[in-house]
């Protein structure tokens, strides 16, 4: 159910939950000041309690209320990428609610780039917001995805639907170094350009979310070429010729990674809706920029 900002503000300030659009994916929000509302997020999503939440703020001064001992490069990155799809994990101030951090000494922060949501955060204060999907489903990028997971009556702040379609990139300031913890809409090399040095992708499980089961469709997703002719449907790019008669799901053109990102989760959800059993997806993409994020999400969907 779409609601206006004033109604959304009332819900947050009386300790309720609602869904906010962001530029990446929809988020399931609670005001940081209401422990019961934060608890409800874990229940509604069926999310493991050890998986911490991202704090979403409207301004850098709000962000600085949650973190301490930030490096100078934090400000460089914030200036370049905020508001926008970058989440930074930094040392948390000692008094931060452990429901948010899942007991870690760090906290994830970001300023989303979405008009209505930013206005709401300016008026109602910071919120925690994981992606608005049941645990194990892909993030929601359309109203219909939210309705499927949380019902038609669940309140959703009015505003533009997510344009990116994949989640924010997560980097962490760990032992005096930036590390990439989750591939996301901002390419790794764009961050390296600002820092002036390469960053590693951490294989350590610092990002608790990476150790939980990830989305993979009910259909078995194959990437091996020899499976292409043995499946019920193909997910691919409309400017490539697959020479098959199977049902075809298009991710758009192969040279428009932003558009592919925008469509990817919607196509995954459609596969489940259409009750397919075996699907082949074309993962033959350049190993660079936003494509690396797309490849990572596709590999996760195909690996179980
Ligand atoms: O684009 C996004 O980031 C979306 C929108 C709604 O902002 N949000 C999102 O949140 O993807 P969520 O909760 O689905 O994913 C956040 C990830 C999880 O994998 C979690 O484990 C990790 O961030 N995380 C949160 N706090 C952390 C911390 N202190 N240390 C390490 N990882 C953390
Ligand atoms: Mg999520």
Image: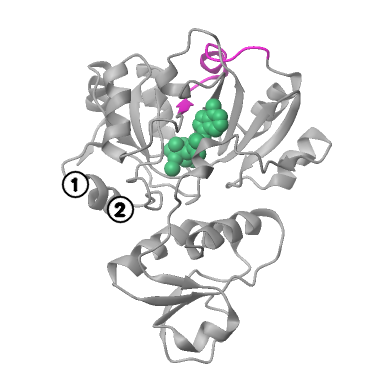
Mark 2: secondary structure: helix
In which image quadrant can residue 241 be found? bottom right
Residue with the mark numbered 1: 151
In which image quadrant can residue 232 be found? bottom left
Q: Quadrant of the N terminus?
A: top left
As measured in the structure, the alpha-carbon distance from the residue carrying label 2 to the one carrying label 1 is 9 Å
Q: Position of residue 27 (x, y in %)?
A: 38, 38
Residue 136 in view here: yes
Residue 13 located left or right of residue 88 = left
Residue 41 located left or right of residue 242 = left
Q: Nearer the viewer, residue 111 or 45?
A: 45
Q: Few, some or many C-alpha atoms within 10 Å of disc 1 (few <14, some 14-19, many ≥20)?
A: few
Residue 146 located left or right of residue 128 = left
Residue 212 located left or right of residue 224 = left
Q: With respect to residue 15, does 236 lie above or below?
A: below
Query: Bounds of the magenta span?
Result: 54-69
């Amino acid at each position: 159910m779409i609601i206006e900002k004033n109604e959304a503000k009332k819900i947050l300030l009386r300790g309720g939950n609602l869904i906010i659009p962001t530029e990446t994916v929809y988020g399931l929000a609670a005001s940081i000041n209401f422990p019961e509302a934060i608890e409800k997020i874990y229940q509604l999503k069926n999310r493991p309690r050890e998986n911490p939440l991202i704090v979403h703020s409207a301004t850098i001064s709000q962000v600085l209320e949650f973190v301490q001992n930030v490096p100078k490069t934090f400000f460089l990155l914030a200036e370049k990428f905020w508001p926008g799809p970058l989440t930074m994990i930094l040392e948390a101030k000692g008094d931060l609610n452990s429901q948010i951090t899942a007991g870690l000494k760090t906290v994830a922060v970001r300023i989303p780039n979405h008009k209505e949501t930013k206005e709401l955060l300016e008026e109602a204060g910071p919120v925690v917001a994981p992606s608005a999907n049941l645990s194990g489903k892909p993030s929601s990028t359309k109203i219909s995805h939210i309705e499927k997971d949380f019902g038609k009556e669940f309140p959703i702040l009015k505003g533009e639907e997510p344009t990116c379609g994949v989640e924010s990139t997560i980097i962490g300031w760990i032992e005096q170094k930036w590390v990439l913890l989750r591939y996301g809409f901002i390419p790794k090399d764009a961050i390296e350009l600002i820092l002036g040095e390469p960053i590693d992708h951490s294989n350590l499980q610092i990002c608790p979310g990476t150790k939980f089961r990830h989305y993979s469709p009910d259909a078995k997703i194959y990437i091996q070429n020899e499976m292409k002719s043995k499946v019920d449907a193909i997910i691919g790019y409309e400017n490539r010729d697959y020479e098959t008669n199977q049902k075809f799901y298009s991710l758009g053109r192969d040279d428009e990674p932003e558009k592919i990102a925008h469509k990817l989760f919607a196509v995954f959800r459609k596969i489940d809706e259409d009750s397919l059993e075996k699907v082949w997806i074309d993962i033959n993409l350049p190993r660079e920029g936003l494509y690396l994020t797309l490849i990572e999400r596709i590999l996760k969907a195909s690996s179980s």
